[in-house]
Amino acid sequence: MEQLANRRMQREAEISAELRDRDDDYDDDLDGDEDYDDEDEDDLDEEEEEDELITEEQRMEEGRRMFQIFAARMFEQRVLQAYRERVAQDRQLELLREL
């Protein structure tokens, strides 16, 4: 059970790292868009507004996923802690019976 919880926590850590990498890549893409013509500025403004809406939705979705990962991790830690406490209690009772 402990191994299962550890594997799941590792997978969730990998997922959250991947989400952070995506966000960093997105920020890097925004930094590279400095060279453009003034004539196309109006077209770019309209596209940027659409991109901002999409990215805002994406950010909300990523935030939800991160919260779900956090909540799942907290739940798993509670279950794992309860399991460890139960095993320790069972071992204590078994030792007391042997005495």
Image: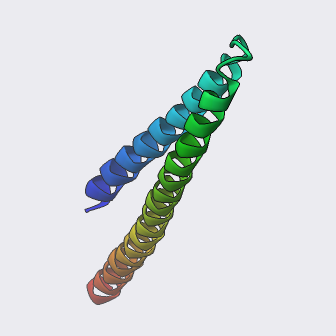
Q: Nearer the viewer, residue 76 or 40?
A: 40
As drawn, 28 above or below 48:
above
| Residue at position x 52%, y 59% in the image | 60
Above or below: residue 31 compared with residue 93: above
Q: Residue at x 47, y 63 (%)?
A: 64
> Residue at coordinates 29% horizontally, 53% vertically from top-left?
3
Give whichever of 82, 17 is nearer the camera.
Answer: 17
Quadrant in which residue 27 is drawn: top right
Residue shown at the point (40%, 50%) measured from the top left: 12
Q: How many marks?
A: 0
Picture quadrant where residue 49 is located: top right
Colour scheme of this structure image?
rainbow
Please indicate whether residue 98 sits to the left or right of residue 50 in the image.
left
Quadrant location of the C terminus? bottom left
In-front residue for pair 73/44: 44
The quarter of the picture where the N terminus appears is bottom left
Q: Is residue 79 above or below residue 96?
A: above
x then y, percent, for residue 83: 35, 75
- Residue 89 is situated, as x and y percent measured from the top left of the image, at 38, 83
Classify residue 39 as left or right of residue 9: right
Q: Position of residue 19 (x, y in %)?
A: 48, 41
Q: Furthest-front residue in view?
A: 39
In terms of depth relative to the viewer, which is nearer, 3 or 70?
Answer: 70
